[in-house]
């Protein structure tokens, strides 16, 4: 450039700085849609909550639904199973925490805490848990009277042998944590909304 | 090089010519046959389609938006009249609550969805039909898409004497003339000219290519009763349903124009800064 | 051509410079690079093209995260992008209108080369690589247009791939074998769509590679300039940065205003409404028309009644461009000093626009309200196109008396600059 730095540098520099800054802001703003497009799209978000009709599920029956791309276990427990779940001592559990998204992190893994919905009264019959083994993500298989899976009457994961009880709590490893309980609510006696 | 007003004008004219002149020339205008020689016999009536009527819409222009009332009334017209034959399969029911659309409330949309029956997943035995052989259905949820009136194309044609009512999700964008065309189709039904031979089952419509359309006039005065008391003339119903169908084709239009306005402000500002930077850098070097 | 040498200032830049002199390279070719001081607006389109290549690749890659190249799902996946993907409508419109802007820029860029003689020695390789880039762009755009699997996508693909069946007239069965191989079946179908998607993703990176060669070939002799005369010394040049970085950015910004108008206020102006209807192999639309940037070649193809010769004429119109450096016999580069060639240049511009118009109309249409059949206008325009390159360019170079050339760029610039 022919003109020296002493020739009104403030005004000239301000113009260039302003141009670069505005250009930078524009470039950053232009980058946002390119990054945001990878976030979940509207149709995926629409399935973030599902409603489940509980009426066809029989006592003792365990059904698998799909929720947020993962299996969701809904189990209707018999009175004996509820009593057995309540009788388990916290010290015997591998993971003492409730892992219920509706409760604080440190809530203990009592059966009462495992079946608690987001608000309102719990129904001890119903266990809702995410069917993803907390070891490496396989789908555990439910234990039924006809086909016993594991020793705790809940679920057995065939990948590496983890076992869960009738409240979805891990009893035999290598899984480190109880099955996650998602946020859910009772819309009526026979209908829940998960997520 | 100095950018004189003349040079800027020439550059803009050239760019504008290429950008606008070329595509304008590329637009197919309605085919016009050259002048026919006079004939002693009465000439056959034209089967070339008339150009659509030009109507002004609330959503035309760079600042146009969809009229909410028209969208809601138009949805009512679609639901009560058109959905008997025409699917809207690309539109998810939840979008009725989206910003820039009819903006029904969430409870309203849930209720609308629950009013539809959609195919259900197989039951616990793996069956997809009930005891009487009917496909299993469940109540719709907002996440579902509008269910079609017919399960497949063949069923639609069987019910419609061989004609296939097109899906309406994109109809406004998929036709030359866009909203004016769809509006004109709906409002131009009438008796055919005396010497035009109509094919069996066809209806006269001068806007439709060939002037014979399989669809009977769908709208009449009082086809729907509007809750807000708007007069339910054919013209009003047509305007409302065309507004709704325009939204169905382009639900993001309002967001697009809003974003465009902001982008333009930024670009004009940035271009101005660049212009003065350019002048400053080149001062004395031209 | 070299400007002031790059001297690395910091420790890191010295370390890098002795191992991979990428900063030195950038400095020499993008910053200190001596560029003729008299380049005008028409010389900014190379930079504009690079920008749009970047835009198309960036938007294309993110669109590909949501698009499904299966014939049963493609159309709906594009609507999923338009309706459900965050900012999907914007990415789609940026990509479709970006293609149009890319071609608008390339046509201006090519006509600039023809006007100022940028194809003449020693810049023949730049021109040839440029024609290669143009052909790659055409292929990429054609492949990309099929992907939404609308009516025009499908039928346009059918028409273009059927070109090769013309070779049956040369060797019986050859054309059909080639077309079947292209299709992967008995017509444009799912197999075709899958391979078109793969190739559409691939070719832009081939374009990027050839762009590197194109700019490399440019930097050997250096830029041409509107006067068409060689550089006489450093007084004829300015460093690329900041002079041409700021100039390129300014004109790019103006061009992007036009782009933004299209994307945000009229995104479907340059497209065909019928492509919003899903592909239907059983029903052909009333008019099969390619996108606007292919219309002149479409007109050339249709102006010849014989199928094989029409296809050969189309290929010939492109191959002609490779020979331009040798077809023009004039010792003078820039049309500013070539009064006869200048007139023919503008006739060529008008000719391509007329061809484009003819290509956009049905084959049996007439010129507006006159009884002139468009097919005759198309034939005359096609004839002119070939005459321009094969007859007029060689002849005019020999018979024309050019205007006297200025001594140097610096002298010419000083002569036009008002006294300071």
Image (cartoon, rainbow, N blue to C red):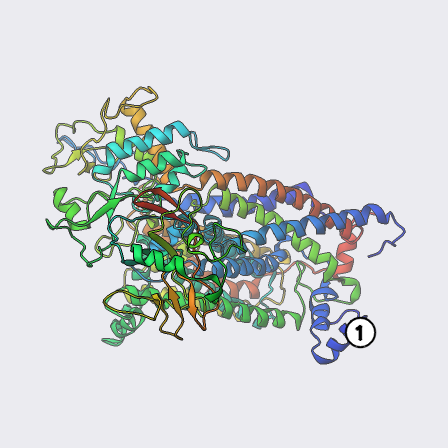
Q: Position of residue C390 (x, y in %)?
A: 46, 66
Closer-to-camera residue (B230/A168): A168
Q: Neighbour class for label 1 at 10 Å: few (<14), some, many (≥20)?
A: few
**In the drawing, does residue C391 fall left or right of residue B33?**
right
- C119 over C105 or under it: above or below: below
Give the residue drawn at x 52%, y 53%.
A36
Closer-to-camera residue (B147/A144): A144
Q: For the image shown, how many numbered marks are present on the structure? A: 1
Residue C122 showing in the rendered view = no
Q: Which residue is mark 1?
A: C11
**In the drawing, does residue C102 fall left or right of residue A122?**
right
- C317 over B69 or under it: above or below: below
Furthest residue in direction bottom, as rendered: C19
Q: Position of residue B75 (x, y in %)?
A: 32, 33
Question: Residue B4's image quarter?
Answer: top right
**In the drawing, does residue B96 fall left or right of residue C260?**
left
Question: Residue C212's image quarter?
Answer: bottom right
**In the drawing, does residue C77 fall left or right of residue C122?**
left
Give the residue drawn at x 21%, y 33%.
B205
Give the residue drawn at x 57%, y 55%.
C342
Q: Position of residue A29 (x, y in %)?
A: 60, 50
Chain to which the residue tagged by mark 1 belongs: C
Q: Secondary structure at mark 1?
A: helix
Give the residue drawn at x 54%, y 62%.
C396
Furthest residue in direction right, as rendered: A6
Q: Position of residue A20 (x, y in %)?
A: 71, 52
Question: Residue B188's image quarter?
Answer: top left
Residue C2 showing in the rendered view = yes
- C22 over C96 or under it: above or below: below
Closer-to-camera residue (A30/B188): A30
């Amino acid at each position: 450039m022919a003109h020296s730095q002493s020739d009104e540098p403030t005004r000239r520099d301000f113009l260039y700085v302003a141009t670069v800054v505005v250009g930078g802001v524009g470039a950053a703003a232009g980058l946002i849609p390119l990054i945001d497009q990878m976030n979940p799209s509207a149709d995926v978000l629409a399935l973030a909550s599902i409603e489940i009709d509980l009426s066809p599920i029989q006592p003792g029956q365990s059904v698998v639904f799909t929720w947020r791309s993962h299996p969701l276990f809904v189990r209707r427990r018999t009175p004996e199973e509820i009593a057995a779940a309540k009788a388990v001592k916290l010290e015997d559990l591998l993971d003492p925490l409730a892992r219920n998204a509706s409760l604080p992190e440190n809530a203990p893994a009592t059966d009462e805490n495992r079946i608690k919905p987001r608000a309102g009264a719990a129904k001890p019959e119903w266990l809702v848990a995410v069917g993803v083994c907390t070891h490496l993500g396989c789908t555990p298989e439910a234990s039924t009277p006809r086909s016993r899976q594991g020793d705790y009457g809940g679920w057995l994961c065939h990948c590496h042998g983890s076992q869960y009880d009738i409240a979805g709590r891990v009893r035999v490893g290598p899984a480190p944590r109880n099955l996650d309980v998602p946020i859910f609510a009772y819309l009526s006696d026979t209908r829940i909304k998960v997520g | 090089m100095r950018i004189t007003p003349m040079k800027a004008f020439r550059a803009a004219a050239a760019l504008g010519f290429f950008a606008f002149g070329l595509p304008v020339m590329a637009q197919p205008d309605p085919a016009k046959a050259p002048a026919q020689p006079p004939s002693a016999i009465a000439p056959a009536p034209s089967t070339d389609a008339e150009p659509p009527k030009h109507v002004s819409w609330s959503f035309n222009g760079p600042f146009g938006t969809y009229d909410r009332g028209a969208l809601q009334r138009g949805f009512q017209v679609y639901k009560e009249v058109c959905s008997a034959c025409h699917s809207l399969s690309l539109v998810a029911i939840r979008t009725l609550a989206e910003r820039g659309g009819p903006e029904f409330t969430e409870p309203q949309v849930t209720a609308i969805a629950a009013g539809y029956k959609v195919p259900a997943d197989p039951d616990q035995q793996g069956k997809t039909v009930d005891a009487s052989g009917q496909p299993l259905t469940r109540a719709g949820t907002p996440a579902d898409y509008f269910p079609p009136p017919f399960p497949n194309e063949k069923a639609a044609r069987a019910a419609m004497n061989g004609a296939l009512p097109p899906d309406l999700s994109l109809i406004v964008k998929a036709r030359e003339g866009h909203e004016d065309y769809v509006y004109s189709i709906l409002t131009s039904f009438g008796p055919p000219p005396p010497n035009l031979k109509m094919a069996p089952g066809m209806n006269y419509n001068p806007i439709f290519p060939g002037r014979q359309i399989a669809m009977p006039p769908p709208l009449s005065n009082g086809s729907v009763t509007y809750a807000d008391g708007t007069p339910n003339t054919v013209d009003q119903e047509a305007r409302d349903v065309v507004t709704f169908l325009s939204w169905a084709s382009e639900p993001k239009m309002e967001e697009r124009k809003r974003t465009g306005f902001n982008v333009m402000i930024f670009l004009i500002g940035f271009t101005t800064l660049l212009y003065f930077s350019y002048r400053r850098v080149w001062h004395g070097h031209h | 051509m070299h400007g002031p040498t790059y001297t690395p200032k910091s420790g890191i830049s010295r370390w890098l410079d002795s191992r991979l002199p990428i900063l030195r390279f950038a400095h020499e070719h993008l910053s200190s690079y001596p560029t003729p001081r008299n380049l005008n607006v028409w010389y900014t389109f190379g930079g504009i093209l690079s920008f749009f290549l970047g835009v198309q690749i960036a938007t294309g890659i993110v669109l590909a995260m949501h698009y499904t190249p299966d014939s049963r799902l493609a159309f709906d996946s594009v609507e999923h992008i338009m309706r459900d993907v965050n900012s999907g409508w914007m990415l789609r419109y940026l990509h479709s209108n970006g293609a149009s802007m890319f071609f608008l820029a390339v046509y201006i860029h090519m006509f600039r080369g023809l006007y100022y003689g940028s194809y003449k020695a020693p810049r023949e390789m730049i021109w040839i690589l440029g024609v290669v880039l143009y052909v790659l762009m055409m292929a990429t755009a054609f492949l990309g247009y099929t992907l939404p699997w609308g009516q025009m996508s499908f039928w346009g693909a059918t028409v273009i791939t059927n070109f090769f069946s013309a070779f049956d007239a040369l060797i019986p069965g050859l054309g059909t074998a080639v077309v079947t191989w292209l299709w992967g079946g008995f017509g444009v179908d799912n197999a075709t769509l899958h391979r078109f998607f793969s190739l559409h993703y691939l070719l832009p990176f081939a374009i990027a590679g050839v762009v590197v060669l194109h700019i490399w070939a440019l930097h050997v002799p250096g830029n041409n300039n509107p006067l068409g005369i060689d550089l006489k010394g450093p007084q004829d040049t300015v460093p690329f940065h900041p002079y041409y970085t700021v100039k390129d950015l300014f004109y790019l910004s103006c061009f992007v205003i036009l782009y933004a108008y299209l994307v945000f206020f009229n995104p479907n102006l340059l497209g065909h409404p019928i492509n919003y209807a899903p592909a239907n192999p059983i029903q052909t639309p009333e008019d099969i028309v390619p996108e606007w940037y292919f219309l002149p070649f479409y007109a050339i193809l249709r102006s010849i009644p014989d199928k094989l010769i029409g296809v050969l004429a189309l290929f010939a119109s492109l191959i002609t461009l490779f020979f331009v450096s040798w077809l023009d016999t004039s010792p003078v580069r820039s049309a500013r000093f070539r009064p006869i060639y200048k007139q023919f240049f503008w006739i060529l511009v008008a000719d391509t626009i007329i061809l484009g118009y003819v290509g956009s109309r049905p084959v049996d249409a007439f010129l507006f309200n006159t009884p002139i059949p468009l097919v005759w206008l198309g034939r005359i325009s096609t004839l002119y196109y070939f005459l321009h390159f094969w007859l007029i360019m060689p002849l005019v170079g020999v018979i024309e008396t050019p205007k006297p050339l200025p001594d140097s760029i610096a002298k010419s610039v000083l002569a036009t600059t008002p006294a300071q």
